[in-house]
Image (tube, rainbow, N blue to C red):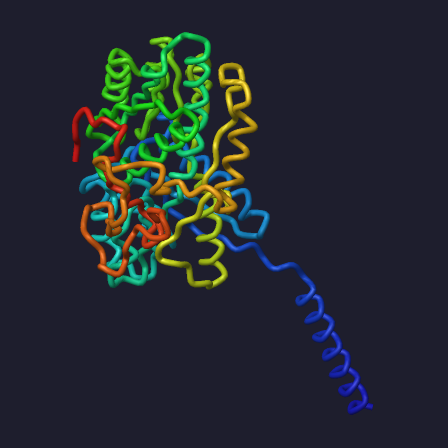
Amino acid sequence: MKKITVVLLVLLLAAGFVFAGAQTEAAPAAAKTLKVGLLCIGDENDQGYSYNFIQGQKEATEKLAKDGINVEWVIKYNIGEDSTCTDANIEAAEEGCQIIFNNSYGFEPFMLEVAPKYPNVKFVSCTNCVSCVDKLDNTFNAFANIYEGRYVAGVVAGLKLNELISSGKITADKAIIGYVGAYSFAEVISGFTSYYLGAKSVCPSVTMMVSFVGSWSDATAESDAALSLADKGAVIISQHSDNTTPATAAQSKGIFHTGYNADMTGVAPAASLISTRIDWSVYFYEFIKAHVEGVTMAQDWCKGFSDGAVVVTTLNEKIAAPGTKAKMEETIEAIKAGKINVFDTSTFTVGGKVLTHAFALDTNGDFVADSQEAVFDGVYHESLFQSAPYFAEQIDGITWLNVAY
């Protein structure tokens, strides 16, 4: 009897284990949680550059949560492009962040001081170009084809210039755009050149003046530059700077504006036509998901309209020229299909000549390998050899009022 009892007990226990095992296999997997850092040069109050990153972070968090990935963010605001960036990266790593995103161009040198000390932490420098070619496996670069979005914003501006000309408010020779730029190097040059080419594609008489302020984020300097450009005859203002003050300055002068990083119609409804921005949620989502799943992420990432990484904000149809929305949508689809190449060399000249030869430059102005010729098939191929822009030509039709390196 004892033997039978023991055998029955063993069989029952075995069945229980099998049943329990089946229950375990059928149960949903527990959500994965990780800590991620985001270091910002500004904060949400700039309503521009850092605000755009914060929006991307929030959107990526929601999307990741639907995939069972919970992210605890460590966000540090108003970090300087100096040793405070070094300290912030160390603090984020010590707080347990597995990934640390640095959002400003000038953060990279300080990030790279810290990365070798934390080989198990992934450090990402957004908008820069050194991390993808260093000897570290845990450093990354990311940007987007924002020149595509700027070209479209330029088309919107050009159509508005045409309306001003046809209504008699300005003459064709007064179709002048003023552009507030941070620094006179490739990232900014690429942006305002693509914007100008977009405007020129619909308004052939357009010219542009650029004023550099020597800072990514100086609200007062950006406003002063925009006001000065208006006084010099600009009837539309655009920008590659972090704040909304160029938009409010344009409105105060009774002229128009196209923005960057965020919809600026809230602060300048009578002036702001449209903005373009990088949707950082696309990259944050891809990178964090790849990390959780153990997938190797490219050390240099760049996408555009086709992947949703570049977007435009809602067109302000109350002040946009008639037909703008349809033309804008047509242009975006043509860029996606490869029917429009933003830097088509037949559409601009440099010193009166068509550009036929140019080496790709990185954002520090250093030549890359000779084999990386940027001009071929009648196009300057921007962001092909690295994510960070390298177009640094001074094309005809654009006047630089100063420089700021």
Residue 310, given in percent of the width and then of the height, sits at 45, 40
Q: Residue at x 81, y 89 (%)?
A: 4
Residue 190, given in percent of the width and then of the height, sits at 30, 38
Residue 184, given in percent of the width and then of the height, sits at 21, 34
**Within the image, what quadrant is residue 30 found in?**
bottom right
Q: Is residue 27 left or right of residue 277?
A: right
The C terminus lies in quadrant: top left
Tally the numbered discs.
0
Q: Residue at x 31, y 50 (%)?
A: 375
**Nearest to the observer: residue 134 or residue 172:** 172
**Residue at the front extreme, as displayed:** 353
Tell me if residue 382 can be seen.
no
Q: Residue at x 55, y 26 (%)?
A: 325
Residue 372, given in percent of the width and then of the height, sits at 28, 57
Q: Residue at x 48, y 49 (%)?
A: 285
Q: Is residue 200 left or right of residue 336?
A: left
The N terminus lies in quadrant: bottom right
In the image, residue 4 sits, relative to residue 309, either above or below, namely below
Tell me if residue 299 can be seen.
yes
**Nearest to the observer: residue 255 or residue 323:** 323
Q: Is residue 251 left or right of residue 403?
A: right
Q: Is residue 403 left or right of residue 61?
A: left
**Nearest to the observer: residue 273 or residue 373:** 373
